[in-house]
Image: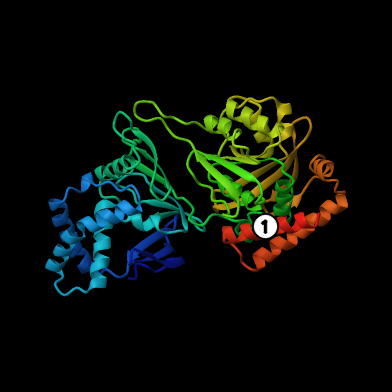
Amino acid sequence: MDKNKGTIKIDSYKLNVNDIVVNVDITLGRNEFVPLYNVSILNISKITNIILHKIREEFVSKINVGDIKIKDSSSQNAIKDKFQKEILVLIKKYFPDVDKKTSNLLVNYLIQENIGLGNVELLLRDKNLEDIVINNAHDPVWVYHRKHGWLKTNVKIQSESKIRHYSTMIGRDVGKEITLLKPLMDASLPSGDRVNATLSPISTIGNTISIRKFAEKPWTITDFIREKTLSYYAAALIWLAVQNELSILITGGTGSGKTSMLNVVSNFFPPNQRIISIEDTRELTLPDSLHWVPLETRLPNPEGKGEVTMLDLLVNSLRMRPDKIIVGEIRRKKEAEVLFEAMHTGHSVYATLHANNARETVVRMTNPPIDIPKLMLTALSLIVVQHRDRRTGRRRTLQIAEVLPNGDPNVLLQLDAQKDQLNQINESQVLMETINLYTGLTPDEIRKDINEKINILKWLVKNNITNIHQIGLIFAKYYIKKLRHK
């Protein structure tokens, strides 16, 4: 009987991880409710793998792997060089006729197994994955795929102690610790990937590791339009607001794409303005044509000293002569007060907030813990709400709203979930008047400008320009051309 009978192949592709060729198959079995993300190493046979396991045991018995620290790619290369000789001796012992290419492959594999995160390293190299989560040693590792949502993998961690070892190793390399007295840890990998770890019995069914991958290729406006996250008109409207130095708040639930939208909005920034970004963990990537200074908060050391908060950086950023300020997330009243003060003093501000729709955004901003006066919200021009359908994993812009003089939202565009399209449901009462006030453009001229922007965006999509730095140059040329024709 064919055990694969009734299995549907959803996707298939290959990865190259340090010359280790990895095949990825995403399938859905007849009696399965969640697709399987199956990784298999193509250029290492089962027999070779058994012998490598024996080499690994000998290597571990000779070298105290637990004392090894990997802080960045250069130290990883130093470690590889340090132990390569020992590993090569063992490889020659078991594979006397091995050639240099195969030998290097086996060295890379053993390094990954012994001083890395084992097969989790393979998952980390897949650019299609956004999250990798280890729930315990009994269940398989789960991943969140950009295209296919949550998937179960065929990767398992052999023991709870191994999961704890990975957590300890990750923490130690960035000066963090996780113990029974401190069973929760936030850290990061050298690649910039964010890591959260918990120890049993706080997590009652085992030790956990959650890895939010740093996007090697940041989302761009071209990606958002092509994936139908955003319509051409909505993108042009946001561009119009950015060009005219109006502030935007991006809201949505967890995993809805708020930071991705923040990155997309930054595509529209002009090159002749100073941009300061403030994040807890660096996630944004702006075009290299921009005048950009990224800042990052810092947690206190084990003695409770050296902390640098979001508020510290916000206050400091105002002394750096910024034109635009980007804030990873608003959480507290003081942060919001400083941000709105920045808006009132002529700075453009772009930030994110957890809220599911435009009305909820206003409620959250005007109640504890943020609790700012409702009339202060008028300094904000647009609220862009992101949404993720948890059944399909599809991300869309749910609403784009302006803020009325009384602080209430006026939803201009709203997603029709049935037709999967953003529709205009209300006329602007404030946005167009504000642009007219500061630019003198008539409603007809504003509409003409929006149509010109739509044509440029269509050209970007048609020519498949998705590199953030290329897009930055195109917008830079656009602004220079506008400046010369004034």
Q: Quadrant of residue 358?
A: top right
Instruction: Determine crowd level at label 1: few under 14, some 14-19, many 20+ residues with C-alpha closer than 10 A.
Output: many
Name the residue at 55% across, 44% down: 293
Question: In the rendered image, is residue 297 in sight?
Answer: yes
Label 1: which residue?
475
Q: Judge from the rendering whether residue 30 lies leftward or rightward of residue 382; answer left or right.
A: left
Name the residue at 62% across, 49% down: 266
Q: How is the image coloured?
A: rainbow
The image position of residue 432, as x and y in percent, is 81, 44
Please tell me whether mark 1 sits on a helix, a strand or a loop.
Answer: helix
Q: Judge from the rendering whether residue 405 lies leftward or rightward of residue 194; answer left or right.
A: right
In-front residue for pair 93/21: 93
The image position of residue 166, as x and y in percent, is 30, 45
In-front residue for pair 144/282: 282
Determine whether 301 is above or below 96 in the image: above
The image position of residue 43, as x and y in percent, is 30, 70
Name the residue at 16% across, 59% down: 86
Q: How many marks?
A: 1
Quarter holding the N terminus is: bottom left
Name the residue at 54% across, 30% down: 311
Q: Quadrant of residue 476?
A: bottom right
Amino acid found under the numbered disc labelled 1: Phe
Question: In the rendered image, is residue 428 in sight?
Answer: no
In-front residue for pair 50/8: 50
The image position of residue 382, as x and y in percent, is 71, 41
Quarter holding the C terminus is: bottom right
